[in-house]
Amino acid sequence: MGAHRLRSADGITHIGGRAMVNETVYEGRCFCGAVQFEVSGTPVAMGYCHCDSCRHWSAGPVNAFTLWKPDALKVTQGGDRIDTFNKTPISYRKWCKQCGGHLFTEHPTMGLVDVYAAMIPTLSFEPGVHVNYQEAVLHIHDGKPKMKDMPKEMGGSGVTLPE
Ligand SMILES: [Zn+2]
Ligand SMILES: [Zn+2]
């Protein structure tokens, strides 16, 4: 992973995104609190997805994502209340059966899980990229790269668009 550095909410700088002795843990819970989980370490990437699927699923104009290796995520309570819907094989969207609150989305083909930034409020959200910007309905002028679809290393075209 090279020597890139990501700063966690506690101010500790983790190098390379791999586990050190004291990993930072971020706690999340669904809308009603029946489902609780935690993610530990450092996200692989953070940003905004503008795709039609994320917008319809979330009923919002944009999805703020944080991507993690699957083993960084641990459901600590209410795992039996989690249900899944996969409209496509690349996204298994998870929610709480009791309150309908969204939790996270598994991306098995990428080997990553998207824990919605809104679900882990103690994480310092530092978006690095916008993806699927060709489908955007809310244009965000923040100077961050706007990928037409996905970065090349994630199977996309790698093409960027103007804001
Ligand atoms: Zn719930
Ligand atoms: Zn999306």
Image (spheres, rainbow, N blue to C red):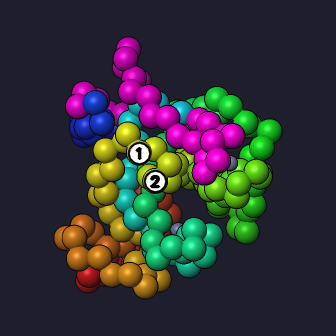
**Majority secondary structure in the magenta region:** loop
Residue placed furthest toward the right: 80
Q: From this view, report whether residue 61 is shown above or below residue 119.
A: below
Residue 105 shown left or right of residue 150 in the figure: right
Name which residue lies at 56% across and 78% down: 52
Q: Mark 2 touching mark 1, by CB under 8 A?
A: yes
- Tell me where the magenta segment starts and ends, as one range: 11-37
Q: Is residue 143 left or right of residue 131?
A: left
Q: Residue 51: x percent and y percent?
A: 51, 75
Where residue 129 sits in the image (x, y, percent)? 32, 63
Residue 33 colored magenta? Answer: yes
Kindly identify which numbered label has been placed on residue 118. Answer: 2
Name the amino acid, label 1. Pro
Amino acid tagged 2: Ala
Under circle 2, the secondary element is: helix
Q: Residue furthest left?
A: 143
Could you tell me residue 162's position as x and y percent?
26, 83
Q: Which residue is mark 1?
A: 121
**Residue 10 drawn at (x, y percent):** 28, 30
Residue 104 versus residue 161 in the image, above or below: above
Circle number at residue 63: none
The one of 25 and 18 positioned closer to us in this rendering: 25
